[in-house]
């Protein structure tokens, strides 16, 4: 309804001298056409809590807990602390991300000078309305999209576009919210306010949650949970019906048997393990001055195969540096150097170029300047009239030399091809008057500047090249210059460059990301399109950035990295922030991601073994109309010492191996032989015990011991190579399990077993090793064949 009213709103072309009337302002406020600050589009805290608490599996576990409470099986609720911990960690992570994004503040214009009823008045920026006449002067930040109606301004749009050049705005020109007024004075009419302004739309898009975009490991875990969630309901119902109705078991035994099977089929501890491992990695990276906003990005960065970087701030240092200067026409080098030092000493240190000139040319003759003309984007030069009465200027050759440019074009091109930004220092034969030059100049020297290559940049890019990560350099600068600098930094394929202004259609971007390494003259919107094109090529894309103009590209990338020295907006949107803005930290972040992924992939197999075994044993029990042979407390005991404790130890170990293959495939290849072994030996023991009419309690204890033995064998396999730490861990968990079996018998449902049952258990324990060994060989052979077939089809 509000939107309809706003669409029908009649526009008012108020006189710049009088502005809107109080009645017109009141009417616009009533229709929501004021410049209100848009709220972050993140979920509210209650919504975050609800989304984490009200999940399918929390409902399943809640029902299980209620059923166990009804039958008084309190000792079988050992799984509940893990479920509560999982839920709390999920809430804490999302609330933290929300707080970071809610801090996103691109617009910092608390007040504005407005003309209403013919009077100038200063009011809060959120009290402005559509069609207000606002007066802008040097230092103002433009609070809403506007159009100049009188006067002239020099505007810096670097916060929005990433380009630092000042842009002249005259009557009829548009002003983007978020840009700054450098000089001049003008009145402008507000064209778009509130959520319609450019800066508000950017804020809303930047804070929008990326639903459905998860790391491969999390996607795999979610898929596993979804599949098990579908399976457990019919199996659980079938187990209860079969035990309670057909086998005429007690309600207590039927419930506990069903619960034992269900909790065995759910890897409830795996989420907790993953969260803890990622949290530990976040702490380790924080010690290396890397701030993690989203823990899942640690894994994503470890899987990245394309890294998009900017030239300035990533490949090079932010500041400029004078590399060389070349005198012209046989002039004396020392004399020109001193003259240039006197010239720059008189200038204000108001930009990076002048800072570099002052730092390099510091030994002057002591001559003073009579008049000083600071750099202007309109004139494209800095100038000064020295005490000797002569006028000197320094600036871009094409603007200073003008008609004489062709004479020196080849020499300038040679310097530019080496990646230098070239300035010319010249004596001006006319009179300086803050206007573009009109008279001839006498060139004295060329000055070559560049952003110095970051320390460690070459080693960093060499690391990524060795690890099959393609680098794409995306910059607003001249593509040739960027190409030269990229080559100097050791980026593979730096000679393949393109001017992004030639890319028009979506297909152009789709083709260009395959053909080129360096992209020059790139606009902020094109950065985002290049990231999207790479993702359409099924690439896992990381993006580095430091400005507001990078925000949407950072948001679209699979993993976003910001430099702390850049804008606050980029740091808040990025998943990972380099606090010391040192790009050479990236290999350590990748190494940390590998450690997490490889270790969790290895330990996840322990959890999946339990799931495969429990599912097959449950189906086996239903088909043969047998009671489920294990109790929930016994499943918890086995899980604690063969899965839980060892998995946390193994997950936090060093591991620098390359990540190979897919998470779920690798886990299943490791887990399937062990899960099948567990099922074969336990189901065989159940059948034999049934034939020999062994007591059910005796069978339950025997199965607990047998499953634990298989679990320790699997743990030995997973933990290889066996170093001192692994041996201590293995001995420790076995000792812990034995102590619980001896001193926690009643709590875990452990009873005495008959000699007949002992003998059967020993036999099946002995056959466990060869069964596990041969099943592993079979599964590995099948996996290798599948990979071969997949590779053949991929090449085809």
Image (cartoon, rainbow, N blue to C red):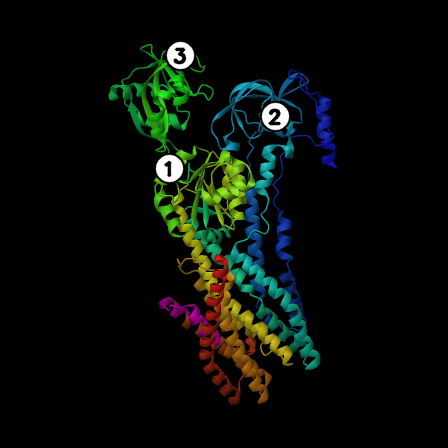
Q: Is residue 485 left or right of residue 781?
A: left
Q: Secondary structure at mark 2?
A: strand
Which mark is in front, 1 or 2? 1
Res 732 visible: no
Residue located at (57% from left, 55% from top): 90
In the structure shown, which secondary structural element does the residue marked by tag 3 occupy? loop
Name above or below for residue 609 compared with residue 582.
below
What residue sits right under mark 2 in the picture? Answer: 146
Q: Position of residue 613 (x, y in %)?
A: 55, 73
Label 2: how many residues lie within 10 Å, few (<14), some (14-19) or many (20+)? many
**Residue 61 part of the magenta-drawn span:** no
* Rendered residue at 44%/58% (across/down): 659
Q: Give the structural element (helix, strand or loop) at label 1.
A: helix
Which stretch did the figure color magenta? 710-729
Mark found first going from the N terminus, 2 or 3: 2
Q: CA distance from mark 2 to mark 3?
A: 38 Å
Disc 1 designates what residue?
485
Residue at 54% from the left image edge and 79% from the top image edge:
682
On screen, residue 85 versus residue 359, left or right, reads right
Q: CA distance from mark 1 to mark 2?
A: 39 Å
Asked whether the residues under the numbered discs 2 and 3 touch, taking CB atoms below 8 Å apart as contact, a structural biologist would say: no
Q: Which mark is residue 439?
A: 3
x then y, percent, for residue 467: 40, 52
């Amino acid at each position: 309804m509000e939107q309809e009213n706003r669409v029908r709103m009649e526009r008012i072309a108020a006189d710049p001298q009088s502005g809107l009337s109080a009645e017109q302002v009141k009417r616009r406020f009533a229709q929501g056409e004021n410049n209100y600050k848009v709220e972050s589009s993140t979920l509210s805290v209650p919504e975050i809590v609800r989304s984490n608490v009200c999940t399918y599996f929390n409902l399943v576990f809640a029902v299980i807990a209620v059923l166990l409470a009804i039958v008084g099986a309190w000792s079988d609720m050992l799984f509940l602390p893990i479920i509560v911990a999982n839920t709390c960690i999920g809430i804490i992570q999302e609330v933290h991300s929300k707080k970071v994004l809610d801090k996103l503040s691109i617009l910092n214009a608390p007040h504005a000078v407005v003309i209403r009823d013919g009077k100038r008045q200063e009011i809060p920026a959120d009290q402005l309305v559509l069609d207000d006449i606002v007066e802008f002067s040097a230092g103002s930040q433009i609070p809403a999209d506007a159009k100049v109606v009188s006067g002239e301004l020099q505007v810096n749009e670097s916060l929005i576009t990433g380009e630092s050049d000042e842009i002249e705005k005259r009557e009829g020109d548009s002003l983007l919210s978020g840009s700054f007024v450098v000089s001049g004075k003008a009145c402008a009419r507000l064209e778009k306010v509130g959520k319609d302004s450019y800066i508000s739309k950017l804020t809303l898009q930047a804070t929008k949650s990326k639903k459905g975009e998860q790391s491969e490991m999390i996607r795999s875990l979610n898929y596993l949970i979804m599949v098990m969630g579908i399976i457990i309901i019919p199996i659980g119902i079938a187990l209860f019906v079969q035990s309670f109705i057909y086998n005429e078991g007690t309600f207590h035994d039927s419930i506990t048997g069903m619960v034992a099977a269900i909790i065995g089929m759910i890897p409830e501890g795996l989420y907790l393990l993953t969260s803890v491992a990622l949290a530990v990695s976040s702490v380790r990276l924080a010690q290396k001055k890397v701030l993690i906003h989203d823990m899942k990005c640690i894994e994503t960065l470890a899987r990245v195969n394309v890294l998009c970087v900017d030239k300035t701030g990533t490949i090079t240092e932010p500041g400029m540096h004078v590399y060389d200067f070349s005198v012209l026409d046989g002039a004396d080098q020392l004399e020109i150097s001193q003259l240039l030092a006197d010239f720059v000493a008189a200038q204000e240190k108001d930009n990076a170029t002048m800072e570099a000139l002052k730092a390099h040319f510091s030994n002057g003759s002591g001559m003073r300047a009579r008049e000083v003309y600071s750099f202007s984007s309109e004139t494209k030069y800095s100038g000064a009239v020295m005490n000797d009465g002569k006028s000197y200027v320094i600036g871009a050759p094409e603007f200073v030399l003008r008609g004489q440019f062709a004479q020196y074009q080849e020499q300038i091109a040679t310097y530019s091809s080496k990646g230098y930004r070239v300035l010319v220092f010249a004596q001006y034969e006319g009179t300086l008057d803050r206007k573009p030059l009109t008279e001839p100049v006498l060139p004295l020297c060329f000055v070559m500047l560049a952003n110095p290559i970051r320390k460690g940049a070459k080693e960093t890019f060499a690391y990524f090249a060795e690890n099959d990560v393609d680098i794409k350099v995306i910059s607003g600068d001249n593509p040739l210059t960027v190409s030269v600098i990229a080559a100097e930094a050791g980026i593979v394929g730096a000679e393949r460059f393109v001017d992004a202004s030639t890319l028009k259609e979506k297909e152009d971007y789709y083709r260009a990301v395959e053909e080129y390494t360096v992209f020059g003259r790139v606009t902020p919107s094109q950065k985002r399109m290049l990231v999207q094109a790479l993702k359409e090529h099924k690439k896992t894309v990381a993006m580095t950035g430091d400005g507001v103009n990078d925000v949407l590209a950072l948001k679209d990338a699979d993993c976003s990295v910001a430099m702390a020295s850049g804008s606050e907006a980029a740091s808040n949107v990025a998943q990972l922030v380099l606090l010391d803005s040192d790009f050479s930290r990236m290999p350590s972040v990748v190494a940390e991601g590998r450690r997490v992924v490889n270790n969790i992939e290895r330990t996840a197999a322990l959890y999946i073994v339990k799931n495969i075994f429990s599912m097959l044993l449950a189906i086996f029990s239903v088909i043969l109309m047998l009671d489920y042979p294990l109790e929930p407390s016994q499943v918890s005991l086995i899980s604690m010492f063969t899965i839980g404790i060892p998995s946390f130890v193994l997950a936090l170990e060093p591991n620098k191996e390359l990540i190979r293959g897919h998470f779920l495939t690798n886990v299943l290849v490791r887990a399937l032989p062990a899960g099948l072994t567990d099922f074969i030996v336990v189901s065989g023991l159940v059948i034999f015990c049934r034939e020999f009419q062994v007591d059910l309690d005796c069978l339950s204890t025997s199965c607990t011991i047998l499953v634990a033995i298989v679990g320790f064998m699997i743990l030995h396999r997973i933990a290889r190579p066996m170093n001192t730490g692994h041996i201590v861990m293995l001995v420790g968990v076995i000792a812990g399990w034995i102590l619980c079996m001896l001193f926690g018998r009643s709590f875990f449902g452990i009873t005495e077993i008959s000699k007949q049952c002992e003998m059967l258990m020993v036999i099946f324990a002995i056959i466990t090793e060869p069964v596990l060994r041969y099943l592993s060989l079979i599964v590995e052979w099948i996996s290798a064949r599948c990979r071969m077939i997949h590779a053949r089809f991929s090449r085809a």
